[in-house]
Image (cartoon, rainbow, N blue to C red):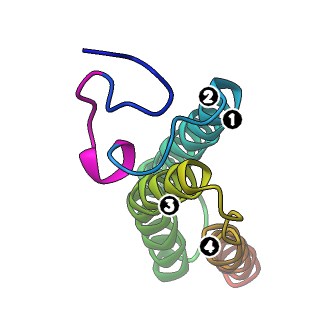
Amino acid sequence: MSDSPTGPGPRRFPRSVYGTGTEPDPRFSLANERTFLAWIRTSLALLAAGVALEGLDLALQPGLRLAASVVLVLLGVLAPVQAWRGWARDERAMRRGVPLASPTLASPLTAGVGLAGLLVLLGLLLR
């Protein structure tokens, strides 16, 4: 099979991403992949923080501690799903030569981490 920038090249997964447009500069695809992997690391940190917050049994008001843990774990579960969608969306955009869409993960993640922090703060004050 040919591996030319315009040909189909070797079969790659997912076909919905790699089967469209032309092959972009590898530096841009690799940067997109690094961003995806950064979101995966972030999701692992969120999961670890949520589990640690509840598992270490810190001296916080129990209901607020549990709520903060749930928020962090939910963010940790949802972040990789959205990261995958963002990676695929951006890769398709680069292959089609269209502008990249605005990030969709940063605002909800910021709000969720802020909420978890507020719950921990309240848990400290109300213990």
Q: Which residues are magenta?
A: 10-18
In this view, the mark in front (4 or 1): 1
Q: Where is residue 31 shown, x and y percent of the image?
A: 68, 34
Kind of residue at disc 1 = Phe
Looking at the picture, which amino acid does disc 4 mark? Thr
Q: For the residues labelled 2 and 1, say whether their Cβ atoms are less than 8 Å apart.
A: yes
The one nearer the camera, 76 or 11, is 11
Label 1 or label 3, whichever comes before in sequence order = 1
Report the residue marked by disc 3.
89
Q: Quick check: 18 above or below 30?
A: below
Q: Earlier in the sequence, mark 4 or mark 2?
A: 2
User: Which mark identifies residue 28?
Assistant: 1
Q: CA distance from mark 4 to mark 2?
A: 20 Å
Circle 1 Cα neighbour tier, 10 Å, few/some/many (<14 / 14–19 / ≥20): few
Closer-to-camera residue (53/45):
45
Question: What residue does disc 4 label?
Answer: 104
Residue drawn 60% across the image and 62% down it: 59
| Residue ID for mark 2 | 30
Identify whether 102 is placed above or below 77: below
Work out whether residue 62 or residue 5 is closer to the camera in this orientation and state it: 5
Do the residues bearing badges 4 and 1 touch, measured as CB atoms within 8 Å?
no
**Of labels 3 and 4, the one closer to you:** 3
Q: Earlier in the sequence, mark 2 or mark 3?
A: 2
